[in-house]
Image (cartoon, helix red, strand yellow):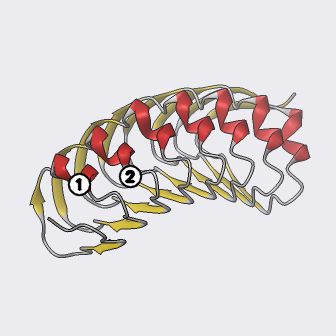
């Protein structure tokens, strides 16, 4: 057992198979980087027991299934990087509990669907929201206007529709907006 471990880096180590559920036993973990491997299966809900976790990198694997609904338990998480997998389902509303979150990168998951939850507006430290090349649909939530630190909004090549909410103008730090290849009809 690896008690007291605070960092676990297994980047590009050619790991395959599922993420073991016992990962939830590493209670001191602050950084978990399993990116660029051949991991498959679902993201185990046990990861959401790692309440000290600050950085989670699961990108560029073959992970599938839904983002665990308990992801909101990771209230200390600063970076959530899960892009380029085969994740499906929606973004859980519990994401609004993650008030320290600065980066969400979940693009390249073609079957990630449904709306961007209104609760995203509670993530007031968010600097980057990346949901490009997904099946995210519906309207951009007006609650995005709460994200005063947001610098990059990238939800291109998705299924967004409707008008861009005027509240987006309240994002005073916004530098980059990528919303092309959607069905947006302009500004409200």
Counting the numbered discs, the total is 2
Residue plotted at (90% across, 45% down): 170
Instruction: Give above or below for 29 relative to 140.
Output: below
Quarter of the image that includes the N terminus: bottom left
Residue plotted at (59% across, 32% down): 116
Residue 156 appears left or right of 171: left
In this view, the residue farthest toward the left is: 17
In this view, the residue farthest toward the front is: 3
The mark that comes first in sequence, 1 or 2, is 1
Quick check: marks 1 and 2 in contact, CB under 8 Å? yes
Q: CA distance from mark 1 to mark 2?
A: 8 Å
Quadrant assignment, res 64: top left
User: Foreground: 77 or 3?
Assistant: 3
Q: Position of residue 182 (x, y in %)?
A: 60, 36
Q: Position of residue 66 (x, y in %)?
A: 33, 33
Q: Position of residue 93 (x, y in %)?
A: 55, 28
Q: Which numbered tag is attached to residue 50?
A: 2
The 10 Å Cα crowd at callout 1, few under 14, some 14 to 19, many 20 or more, is some
Residue 103 appears left or right of 63: right
Which structural element holds mark 1?
A: helix
Quadrant assignment, res 6: bottom left
Which structural element holds mark 2?
A: loop
Residue position marked by numbered label 1 in the rendering: 23
The 10 Å Cα crowd at callout 2, few under 14, some 14 to 19, many 20 or more, is many
Residue plotted at (75% across, 55% down): 150
Residue plotted at (30% across, 71% down): 5
Quarter of the image that includes the C terminus: top right
Q: Position of residue 167 (x, y in %)?
A: 87, 36
Residue 47 appears left or right of 96: left
């Amino acid at each position: 057992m690896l008690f007291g471990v605070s960092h676990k880096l297994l980047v590009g180590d050619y790991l395959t198979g599922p993420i073991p559920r016992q990962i939830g036993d590493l209670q001191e973990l602050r950084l978990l980087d399993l990116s660029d491997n051949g991991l498959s299966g679902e993201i185990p809900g046990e990861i959401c027991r790692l309440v000290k976790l600050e950085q989670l990198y699961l990108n560029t694997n073959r992970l599938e299934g839904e983002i665990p609904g308990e992801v909101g338990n990771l209230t200390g998480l600063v970076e959530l990087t899960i892009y380029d997998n085969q994740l499906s389902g929606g973004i859980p509303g519990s994401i609004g509990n993650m008030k320290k979150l600065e980066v969400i990168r979940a693009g390249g998951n073609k079957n990630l669907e449904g709306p961007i939850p209104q609760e995203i507006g509670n993530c007031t430290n968010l600097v980057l929201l990346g949901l490009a090349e997904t099946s995210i649909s519906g309207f951009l939530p007006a609650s995005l206007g709460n994200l005063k630190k947001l610098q990059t909004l990238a939800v291109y090549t998705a299924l967004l529709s409707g008008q861009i909410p005027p509240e987006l103008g309240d994002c005073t730090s916004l530098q980059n907006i990528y919303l092309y290849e959607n069905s947006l009809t302009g500004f409200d």
